[in-house]
Image (cartoon, rainbow, N blue to C red):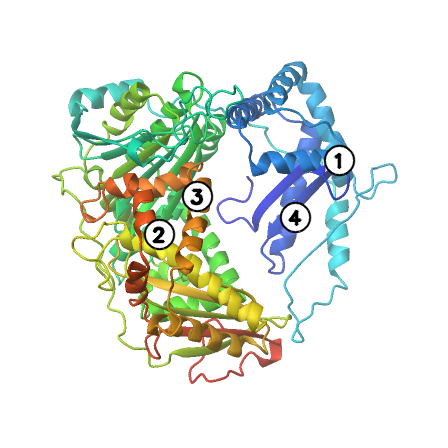
Amino acid sequence: KVERPTPPFIGVEFDCSDAPSEGCAVSTFIVYADAAPGRWQQAVENALRELHHVFRRGLSAAEVQAMKGAILADSRLRAQQAAGGSADQLALLMECDGLGHTFTDAAHHDAALHAAAEAIGLDALNDRARELLEHIVRYGDEDAPRAAACVVCMPSLGADGTTGDAGLEDEVVALLRKRWPADDEGPAGDVITPDRLVAEEELAARRRRLRPRFVAESVVDLAADAPPGAKGGAANPDGMGRAAPEPVLPSDLRLRRLNNGVAVTSARTRAEADAVAVRVSVPGGRSAEDPSRPGELALATATMLQGGCVAGFSREQVEMFCITHLIDLNMEVTEDCVQWDMHFPVGHDGRGLRAALELLHALLTNFSWEEDALETTRALLAAQHDARAKSLEQAALGALMEGFWAGDPRFLDLHPERFAALDLAALERAQRRCMRPDRMEVVVVGDFDEALLDDCLLEYLGTIPPAAGRRPLGPAPAPKAPRLPARYEEPVRRMRLADSEPRAIAYITGRCVSRFGTCGGAVHDNAHPLRAAVALELLTEIINSRLFSMLRDVLGLVYESSIRFHDFELLPVNGYVVTISAAPGKVDEAHAAALRVLRDLVAGRQRITEYDLPKARRAVLSHLDVHTKDLSWWLGRLQHLQAGCLPGKDARCVKDYRAVLEGITVDDLREVVSTLEVDDGKALSVIMESAPHDATNSMASRDKPSPWES
């Protein structure tokens, strides 16, 4: 609050909750900060100053009211979603048993919480807040409650890999003992939560000018793909007189387009009661960036997320608007698309749905670009880049991806030097070029009323004007993949990273068939569009089982080993990544064994058999049962159904999933396996080991230094 735009801290948290391991409630105050000298002290001091202010001044009525409304709304939503069993319910039951508490039904807990909220006044609340903060703000006073522990964790700084803590304890104690005078607080300044982000007069004017309406619509019946019982509706499904379960799988899929070009895909499901998820996506992503200005679109999206000022409202006001309506917003730029995700409850009379789409409208039409938001984003991305460079796993993965993408900067980690020259005007232009209505696809899935959704879509999405002075461009072209090397001149790259613990990691990557295309030659013209995608899911289970069996059970070489395939849908390229975690003395042997498993599979020496398929199919189906209860998973299933650059993905990919899964044969899997590039020169490996601080310049089998080595 006092250190924007470049705060010295990464995050500040205060928590008071039950701790099963301690058998009591524990309050914890945590500051995550830059470890540079002077920066972490500044972060701790700013956080402590704010706690002192709250201790003296108390919380204001406005902020208490806003937070109370959000907590009660969240409680009501949890009560509605807790009708069935879940892992969360089981964890809560075990926690209550461990603490000796009475397990409370979610609906009863919600009613009790609402009653308690009405009974608790502001003075009582502030008294309790002072009680929770007293051990921090009065640290060192003779009559103050004593803190149970004070822990400081910092990276090693010395040449020998250790840090002398002679002065560290004194500095922390001095900060905790520091007191700030009352006149140092400044004005309290309540943040007023806006009722609306877009004025009704402005919306009305756009309605008159644009006349929003649906110009195309189709409805796909999904009932034929539902397994028995998934739709509910049976009068007595279990023979015990209990009511039928609510529908989990969508009954139908609506594919529509607004007259301003926005494509809308919607499906109603009660997978999460009273909750809705929305994804706005535009094809392109980082692959659409100018190679001479890599990271432009990614930096623009991150700046929007850090900024948040819309329609004349401050970031704090917009944040309170989201908190009040429980709107969780995330923006991301992937290799092949830009996507904004929102998750929120529908709320009473659809207020949450209206608020979320109103926020989306404001972000697309009236966002305020700020220099301090850009500075904050640069500092945050620089800190993340620095953290990745110091992580054994992430540094090795970064080196692997650099080789896989042939050094194309559009697909690599955002380096501070690359985005230092990008200014605010360039970011705004990049964002406007990307987020055009005629190239935008909106997916809505959840427990909504169809008529309410139609009204909100016309009101907030149909009134998004096209780019000034430009005609609609139509569907976005398919992203173009970079030219990848035919062979790797250095197929195995060895690296070292300074680390006080002896550790090692190995990665293997190579190309394979794409999920919805013809890359790799394993998709026939008459094949179902889901064939390759489902085959890759089954192969993940089969190969993971073989890696674990050989590398751990038989040879005892690894802590962990696994394979994953990239999630690219629009890029005409795909690949796999094998991860091997082992002790430094065993990582080379484990890497060689993993390559043998892959090569024996592709060459047919250890072919996939009829025994492998049923086991893998059961595993995929078990994952599916969990995924169908998650709205975020449904967003991925429904995304790109109306992307003109991906004709292979259509409504059949939702409707026929189980049928394709059941119909996959061993021959299908063998054909997809044949597209895995695993031969010497076709597969790329990175092996990274930890090394003492004084040995980071000594490398094995490398002629040139790695950018991640210090």
- At a point 19% along the width and 57% down the height, the residue shown is 524
Secondary structure category for the residue under label 4: helix
**Three-letter amino acid code at the position of disc 2:** Ala
Does the CB distance between marks 2 and 1 fall below 8 Å? no
| Residue under label 3 | 306
Mark 3 residue type: Gln
Q: Could you tell which of marks 4 and 1 lies nearer the N-terminus?
A: 4
Q: Is residue 178 left or right of residue 258?
A: right
What residue is disc 4 on?
Answer: 44
Q: Nearer the viewer, mark 2 or mark 1?
A: 1
Q: Nearer the viewer, mark 1 or mark 3?
A: 1
Residue 187 image point, x, y percent: 59, 29
- Image disc number at residue 99: 1
Per the model, the C-alpha gap separating discs 1 and 3 is: 39 Å
Disc number lying in front (4 or 1): 1
Alpha carbon of mark 4 to alpha carbon of mark 3: how far? 22 Å
Q: Residues within 10 Å of mark 2 (few under 14, many from 20)?
A: many
Is any part of residue 529 visible from this angle? Answer: yes
Amino acid type of the residue tagged 4 in the rendering: Val
Disc 2/disc 1 C-alpha distance (Å): 46 Å
Q: Residue at x 29, y 66 (%)?
A: 675
